[in-house]
Amino acid sequence: MKTGASEISLLGISFEKYLTHAQISEAVKQVAVKINTDYAGREVKFVSVLNGAFMFTSDLLKHITVACTVTFIRAKSYHGMESQGSVSLVTDLSENLKGKEVIILEDIVDTGLTMQKLFERIEKDEPASLKICTLLLKPDTYKGDRNIDYTALSIPNDFIVGYGLDYNELGRNLPDIYKVKP
Ligand code: 5GP
């Protein structure tokens, strides 16, 4: 697999380039600007959802200018290209979020099931506020009734890989985002 290529193959499945690293970086920067404005003078606790959000988290935080800390949680719902329909928290939070101004950092909101599960878990800690920031949103498949507070990019309902997102754990290292070829 060659990073930067216009087409790639992972486990025999072909993917074509969909979003360049430059497009992603610009969208990530814009979302950081909004957060900096909304949270001026406050301290943010980011909860990054592993594994998919590691690259997004790293790049977003470089543009955050308000006081912030980051912690991690690990969720799993997909196997291959299919959602398993249930979400498990593989690794729970390592600290209590009571009284914190929390923003969840997700790689992608698809049906919204993972986000729902994360909200239920974090609300138990009684944070002062709780919002979600996602790199990608698939509006056509989103079934939740919660408002998505911050979205960097909205995309159609295609399976994508790269920039932290995987196909059977492969492709997370790609700087660009690819979609499966029809
Ligand atoms: P949801 O629970 O909203 O249906 O799905 C959220 C999770 O499913 C994401 O955190 C991500 O792990 C996975 N997911 C959803 N759509 C895609 C996709 O197009 N590509 C990849 N690689 N993962 C996806």
Image (cartoon, rainbow, N blue to C red):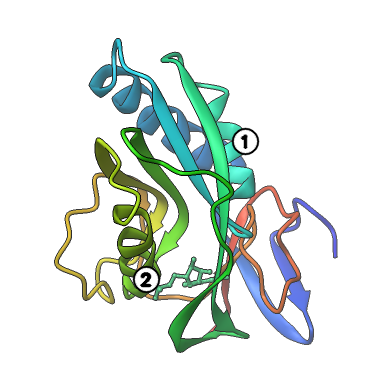
Give the camera-side residue of 37 and 176: 37
In this rendering, would 145 be left or right of 64?
Answer: left
User: Residue farthest to the right?
Assistant: 1
Q: Vertically, is 116 above or below 57?
A: below
Dot 1, how many residues are within 10 Å of its Cα: few (below 14), some (14-19), or many (20+)? few
Q: Which residue type does callout 1 highlight? A: Ser
Q: Cβ–Cβ below 8 Å for labels 1 and 2?
A: no
Q: CA distance from mark 1 to mark 2?
A: 22 Å
Tag shown at residue 37: none
Identify the image quadrant of residue 128: top left
Q: Residue at x 31, y 64 (%)?
A: 120
Dot 2, how many residues are within 10 Å of its Cα: few (below 14), some (14-19), or many (20+)? many
Residue at the spot of label 2: 110
Q: Vertically, is 117 above or below 124?
A: below
Q: Is residue 64 visible?
A: no
Give the camera-side residue of 173 and 7: 173
Q: Residue at x 29, y 54 (%)?
A: 123
Percent position (x, y) of residue 60? 52, 32
Q: Which residue type does callout 2 highlight? A: Asp
Percent position (x, y) of residue 116? 30, 67
Mark 2 C-beta to ligand 1 under 8 Å:
yes
Percent position (x, y) of residue 11? 79, 84
Residue at the spot of label 1: 58
In this rendering, would 163 be left or right of 148?
Answer: right
Q: Residue at x 71, y 60 (%)?
A: 172
Give the camera-side residue of 179 and 173: 173
Identify the image quadrant of residue 164: bottom right
Say which label, 1 or 2, has the lower sequence index.
1
Percent position (x, y) of residue 32? 40, 27
Q: Is residue 178 visible?
A: yes
Q: Secondary structure at mark 1?
A: helix
Q: Secondary structure at mark 2?
A: loop
